[in-house]
Amino acid sequence: MPSLRSLAILAAALSAARAQTYTLSQDLSGANFFSAFKYNESAVDFNNFGNVHFLGEDDANNAKLTFVDSNNRAIIKVDNTTNGAGDPTFGRNTVYLMSNKLMTIGSLLIFDANHMPFGCSVWPSLFTQGQVWPAQGEIDIIENVNLATNNRFSLHVGDDNCVQPTSVSGNQTGQISTANGDISNCTVTPATGQNTIGCVTSETKDNSFGQGFSSAGGGVFAALWDESGIAMWFFSRPDVPSNIGGTAAPDPTTWGKASAWYPASGCNPSTAFGPQIITLYIDICGAFAGQQSVFEQSCASAAPNCSALVGDPANYNDAYWEINYLRVFTNSANVADTSSASSGPTSGGSAGTGSQSGSSPSASQTGSSGALPSLPLSASLLTAALVLVGMLSL
């Protein structure tokens, strides 16, 4: 039987294993920001049916839709100079970026911005998506439309058994807005159009989206994807933790409850998600911002419908990202995200929206609410500790 001394050593090793160390894997800011992304050039928005043309790198740079400003901040914007009035087929120029590197499980993404795009017909998003969509999943970190004031976090997966149990409400600060009984269904069935909205948690903190976010000086979003689940946080500028953005390593265990928490008990983060492409874009109208019932919620007084706004460049003076940095950290228990992304998802990932429909998994599939998000144990430390205990007990 192990001695008290050996048990103490095991406890110490377990504690050390749980206190994961995060290593900076990608540090994207200033001049090196855009070199980390591909420009998803397309004259037509096949994924979300927006009134846009996604420009290639050279055209976007020449049109000053992507550039680094004098404060070393990355700017991504919608064309706000071209007048398309009177042209019913007019699409506004904008940008769709996809990362060159894949983000793997065990990663912590931190995004710091001073301004995000907003305005009637504007649809900005920061999300990650697998190379095969929806089979390899999608994680929406920032998304909403028009003049909405609260950010929406969500998951979209092809796994039939992926849900967010409503019992997690006590372990997150956000509000589940797509609940059906005791679960929120994350499973997408594109062929039938079922549940394209995914499982959504709405941020309840002030200034998490749009004009409010930008007027408050912006803030930080973070997403942690590990074996325990997926957790996402928002911090307005005055509330950013001291171990974010400085020289100290980030430590999510000190940040308090996540805004949105999707525990492994409801959705297996290892099997429902493959390596992820970091995606950043600005769409116009389309399947979300242009949906009439959604448009009317905040923009009914601006125009009879979303498409009526697209031709006027003045509508897009606030449709830009001003980004301080995007950083990806990996923990010591996982392989770093060194693999390269392909040209893009085989069935275009999107910051999916639409109406929630279709059947939901049964309550027996929901699992428990899960504990507060915590970092996974280091397998190597745990194994070493167990071996040491065995030796000491001989």
Image (cartoon, rainbow, N blue to C red):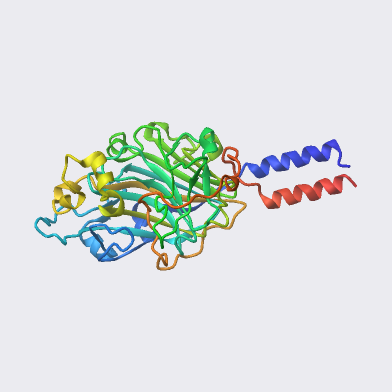
Quarter of the view holding residue 119: top left
Residue 135, how many percent across, how many down? 49, 61
In the picture, the quarter occupied by the N terminus is top right
Identify the residue at the far right of this view. 394
Q: Residue furthest left?
A: 86
Q: Position of residue 376 (x, y in %)?
A: 62, 47
Q: Do we see residue 46 in this rendering?
A: yes
Name above or below for residue 198 compared with residue 260.
below
The number of callouts visible is 0
Residue drawn at 60 percent across, 41 percent down = 368
Q: Is residue 370 left or right of residue 3?
A: left
Find residue 202 and report its horizontal and vertical position in percent.
40, 39
Nearer the observer, 353 or 126: 353
Q: Is residue 61 left or right of residue 10?
A: left
Closer to us: 315 or 79: 315
Image height of 215 relative to 74, above or below: above
Q: Relative to residue 352, is residue 247 depicted above or below?
A: above
- Decide if residue 23 is in sight here: no
Q: Is residue 37 left or right of residue 332?
A: left
Residue in the foreground of this view, choosing between 100 and 132: 132
At which x and y percent is residue 363?
57, 44
In this view, the residue farthest toward the front is: 359
Q: Residue at x 21, y 62 (%)?
A: 62
